Amino acid sequence: MILAASVYLFGGLAALATLLMIFQRDPVKAAMLMLAALLSTAGLYLALSAQLLAALQIILYAGAIMTLFIVALSATPAAWRDKPSRGSFTKVLGLAAAAVILTELLKVSAALKAIMISPEFSETGTLDLALTLFGRFAFQFELLSLLILAAIVAAVALTSKRRAA
Amino acid sequence: MSAYSLAAVSFVLFSLAAAGFLTCGSLVRMLMFLELMLNAANIALVALGPETVSQAYAVMLFAIAAAEAGIGLALIITLASAFRTLEAENIRELKG
């Protein structure tokens, strides 16, 4: 019961933070609201008994990625100077498209109504997760390291070209 | 609690992030909302999938999100220095 309530609580908090982020004009305040949404998601993972994912969410998303966003915001003065220029028609169109996406997703997943889940607190299962990652998914996991290497090379190449110019 | 309500939580988060992505004009904000969309997909994966396998996929998605953020921000910084703006509407030239 408590776990089910906390799923709704953290889900609601994340949704509220995302909603406020849409209407926030200051980029740093928007980044802080994103941080709140990401931390709420970590709480959601805890409620779903995915403790390792909650820790990774805080370390990777709320720590590393958010720091990257703040650094990028402070490194680009254009982010502060720009005034939003989109008309209200474009905004209404965007909101309508998002509403259509939500309606369709809820409609498609209506079959899930029959499946009942009772979230129960279970142990972390980190060993099982490690065995899966380094056993069954070892190839995919190693491919990920190549992906990250490629991302690092691409990011360095992009920014070094800028420096040379 | 039905699986539907768990899915609905992630769908609402995804749609809100999609709404933000479609309505805001700044490239940094668009990337932020893109990350939140990926985050919502991750929640659906963890909430509805088989426990260990879905969590393994979620760990991999974390790495993909980190790579995406890195490349995205590098692109944005390059664009900002070339065009002196971060508004997507003001960037209309494809030639580098």
Image: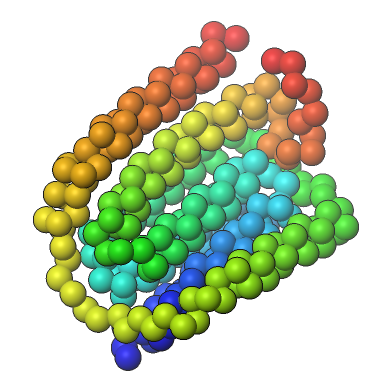
Q: Quadrant of residue A101?
A: bottom right
Residue situated furthest left in the rendering: A127
Q: Quadrant of residue B55?
A: bottom left
Task: Provide residue B70's location: percent of width, then percent of height.
Answer: 45, 34
Task: Provide residue B91's location: percent of width, then percent of height.
Answer: 76, 31
Image side of residue B53 versus residue A163, left or right: left
Image side of residue B1 versus residue A49, left or right: right
Task: Provide residue A58's location: percent of width, then percent of height.
Answer: 32, 57
Seen at 46% across and 83% down, the residue is A114
User: In terms of depth relative to the viewer, which is nearer, A7 or A19?
Assistant: A7
Seen at 53% across and 76% down, the residue is A111
Residue situated furthest bottom in the rendering: A1
User: In terms of depth relative to the viewer, which is nearer, B53 or A60?
Assistant: B53
Image side of residue A98 versus residue A152, left or right: right
Task: Provide residue A143's location: percent of width, then percent of height.
Answer: 31, 31
Seen at 15% across and 70% down, the residue is A123
The correct choice, above or below, for A107 with respect to A151 in the image is below
User: In terms of depth relative to the viewer, which is nearer, A8 or A26?
Assistant: A8
The correct choice, above or below, for A14 with respect to A78 in the image is below
